[in-house]
Structure formats: C-alpha cells, structure tokens
Image: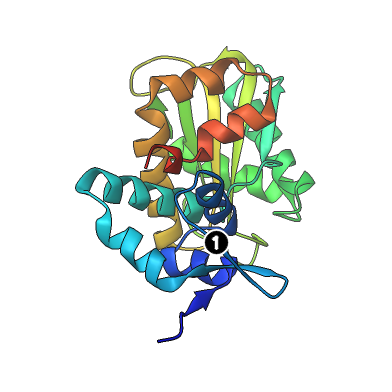
Amino acid sequence: MAKTLLTLKQSAAQLKVTISVIREMINAKILQTVKSGNTIKIDKAELDEWLASLNEEEVKKLSLQRSICHFSDYYKLDNINLDFEADNKYEAIAEMSKKAKELGIVRDHRWLYQVVVAREELVSTAVGNGITLLHARHFHPSKIKKPSVIFGRSKEDIEFDAIDNKPVKLYFMLLLHNDYQHLFSISYISRNILMSERRLKILRESGSPQEISDAIIGSVLKSI
C-alpha cells in the first residue's frame, strides 16, 4: 500500500499545532521526514503511530502545546509595551491603550482608554501578585480590528486596588471579540503564566522582548 505523505502544513493541521512546532519536532528527531520531489514530507502512518504511543504525561504536554499555539493567534512578539512610565493606574491604562493603537489593533486609543477605565471602576482587574488583566466590560468586535493580547510592564509599581493589596507592574490587555476568546485567554494566562514563578520572574526582570515572549508562549515539546 502506498504511503500517505503529509506536507509540514498538513502535519501541523493533523496535530493542531503550528508549522514551527512541526519543524521543532523534526529537529528534535521526534518525527522523521522523507523527500518527495523538492518537498520535505512526513509519513502519516508514522505521525499516527507517534500519537498512539504517547503516555498520559506526554498527552498533557501536547495538549498544552496546542493551547500555546492557539494563544499565539492573539499574542505576537511585537505586542509588548516594556517599561513604560506611569504614575497611577489611569496613566498605565492610557499607555497600554496607546500601544494598541500603535499596533493597529484599534483606531482610537481614547475610546479604548474610556471603556477599559469604565470596567476598572466597577471592580479592579488586578488579580494579585503584581498582575492585572485589563479589558472592557463588553465586547466591541467592530472597534477591535483583530483579537489580540498585549503584554506591558511599567517602570514603577502602581497601586491598582488588587485583591492582595499589592501594587501592579505586569499588564495583560485583552482585546478580544467574544466570550470564547476571552475565557480561553484568561484560562491560558492563569494556568501557564500566573502559576509559574519562573515565568513571572522573567516577565518582571528581563529586558529582552524575545525572552519575555518565550516565557509567555514557550514550547513544551522538547520534553516529549
């Protein structure tokens, strides 16, 4: 029986990950490739066999990688506002709103500032440990060009009425279109970032956007 060969893009779709993850798996010798003309392909039977052989821990890691790939639909390396200056939470929200406009996510940063402040004045979005998850009270898909998450860090700690009474230094601004995107993003940040002191340390201290991005959407497949 002839082999069914998949392109890297098809292989990524099969595993529900990105092409970069497939390349990483090839480099780590998790998957073998064959040459088909001028194209590198993967035997579908080998891919299926690898999936079937995963133990429970490896299945969890693959599930996490899929979650990381999904979050990367919203967060990009450029979505960082590092060490901005602000004296209070309103100035911090203004700086994050300006970054959203600079990235082309919204047309009007003043509108964004107003809806985020309105949400903040209902109850603080600071979740403790120096972190806040800024967002509007309602979804505005017509105002937000593309679902996005922006990460920011202020130079100074800022009082934000946090549940643990600690000031805020790390900001995630959630600019999303619907409940699914919002709840998924909050869950992702909570499970994969807020509960990892190692990642939080990088977000608090690193001066490298790439290192910060790796902490936010770092790969876990090297350990599979």
Residue 124 visible to the viewer: no
Q: Position of residue 101 (x, y in %)?
A: 75, 48
Q: Position of residue 47 (x, y in %)?
A: 40, 65
Q: Position of residue 196 (x, y in %)?
A: 38, 26
- The residue drawn where x is 71% and y is 19% is 85
- Which residue is situated farthest in the front direction here? 1
Q: Quadrant of residue 188?
A: top left
Q: Is residue 143 left or right of residue 122?
A: right
Number of numbered discs = 1
- The residue drawn where x is 58% and y is 59% is 19
Which quarter of the rendered picture does the C terminus lie within? top left
- The residue drawn where x is 55% and y is 61% is 33
Q: Quadrant of residue 129?
A: top left
Which quarter of the rendered picture does the N terminus lie within? bottom left
Badge 1 density bin: few <14, some 14–19, many ≥20, Cα 10 Å? some
Residue tagged 1: 33
- Which residue is situated farthest in the right direction here? 102
| Rendered view: 6 above or below 19 | below
Towards the viewer: 199 or 61: 61
Residue 23 visible to the viewer: yes
Q: Amino acid at mark 1?
A: Thr
Towards the viewer: 150 or 123: 150
Q: Position of residue 68 (x, y in %)?
A: 46, 48
Towards the viewer: 45 or 168: 45
- Element at badge 1? loop
| Rendered view: 13 above or below 115 | below
